[in-house]
Image (tube, rainbow, N blue to C red):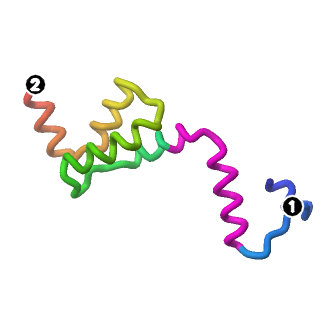
Amino acid sequence: MLEDLEVRLLEYKTVGEFLVDIKKEFREGDEEEVKVAELRRLEQGSKTMKEFIQKFRRIARESGYEEQPLVKEFKWGMNRMICQKLMKSK
């Protein structure tokens, strides 16, 4: 796509049209990779644990991750104080 732009085989009337095509180009890649990246950015922050779990599950379903990698990402995104308390309770 970029090569076509450089040699003027592709032209856009607006930046919006260009951005739509760029998004399509990158989304056509691996949807699982996009979901994995979302999991890695997900943080509990001020969300309740229930809200965090619901969002995590929704993203995790499409990530292709299973078991240990999911546990690792879940712990990483959790509120640090809650995670520490859970680890001490073992």
Q: How many marks?
A: 2
Position in image of residue 1 (x %, y %): 80, 54
Say which amino acid is labelled 1. Glu
Q: Is residue 80 left or right of residue 7?
A: left
Point 7% across, 29% down: residue:
89
Q: Which mark is residue 90?
A: 2
Position in image of residue 61 (x %, y %): 41, 36
Position in image of residue 58 (x %, y %): 37, 43
Q: Quadrant of residue 90?
A: top left
Say which amino acid is labelled 2. Lys
- CB atoms of marks 2 and 1 within 8 Å: no
Residue that carries the numbered disc 1 in the rendered image: 6
Can you name the residue that lies furthest to the left here?
A: 89
Q: Which residues are magenta?
A: 15-34
Q: Badge 2, how many Cα within 10 Å: few under 14, some, many 20+?
A: few
Specify the principal SS of the magenta part.
helix
